[in-house]
Image (cartoon, helix red, strand yellow):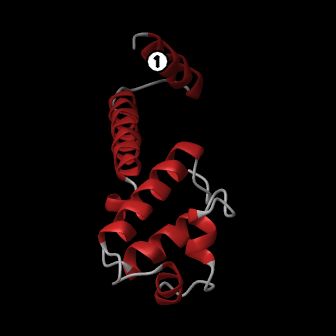
Amino acid sequence: MSNELTDKLTAEFKKNLRDILDERKGITNPKRLSKDAGLGETAVRDILQNKSTSPKLDTVQKLAKALNLPLYRLMPSMIDQSYDELETLREENRLLREVSDQSFTSMDDLRIAAIERSKKK
């Protein structure tokens, strides 16, 4: 994932941020939250008014910390995406271990075995 959020994650983040600020009306205002997060004083306002179209992940993390919330409260889909990526990596690792346990006479044999294995998926 890049440093900037995808459109789907950005929309989810903005909606959840608005909901949390609505829940905490009178306790947390955008200007104060921006300062608490170590951002420019208009950062949260700009996000909520779509002046900041794709906030950086670092910004979201700072806001979650300032709100005393885990990141998944602002962006639950990001956690689901991370689990999917982790499962893919586990499967690739398992296949590599399985292939590397076999003895091959050359690197070409190893490459051919990997190609055959991927076709079986």
Report the front residue among 15 and 106. Answer: 15
Q: Residue at x 59, y 65 (%)?
A: 47
Q: Quadrant of the C terminus?
A: top left
Q: Is residue 28 above or below residue 2?
A: below
Figure quadrant of residue 103: top left
* Residue positioned most to the front: 26
Report the front residue among 41 and 118. Answer: 41
Q: Position of residue 77 (x, y in %)?
A: 38, 46
Q: Residue at x 35, y 36 (%)?
A: 97
Q: Position of residue 105 (x, y in %)?
A: 50, 23
Q: Position of residue 118 (x, y in %)?
A: 46, 18
Report the front residue among 31 and 78. Answer: 31
Q: Which residue is mark 1?
A: 118
Report the front residue among 121 and 96. Answer: 121
11 on left or right of 91: right
Q: Amino acid at mark 1?
A: Ser
Q: Is residue 6 above or below residue 104?
A: below
Numbered disc total: 1
SS of the residue under disc 1: helix
Q: Residue at x 55, y 23 (%)?
A: 111
Figure quadrant of residue 63: bottom left
Q: Residue at x 59, y 45 (%)?
A: 7
17 on left or right of 46: left
- Can residue 58 be seen? yes
Q: Is residue 28 above or below residue 71?
A: below
Q: Position of residue 99 (x, y in %)?
A: 39, 27
Q: Is residue 12 above or below residue 56?
A: above
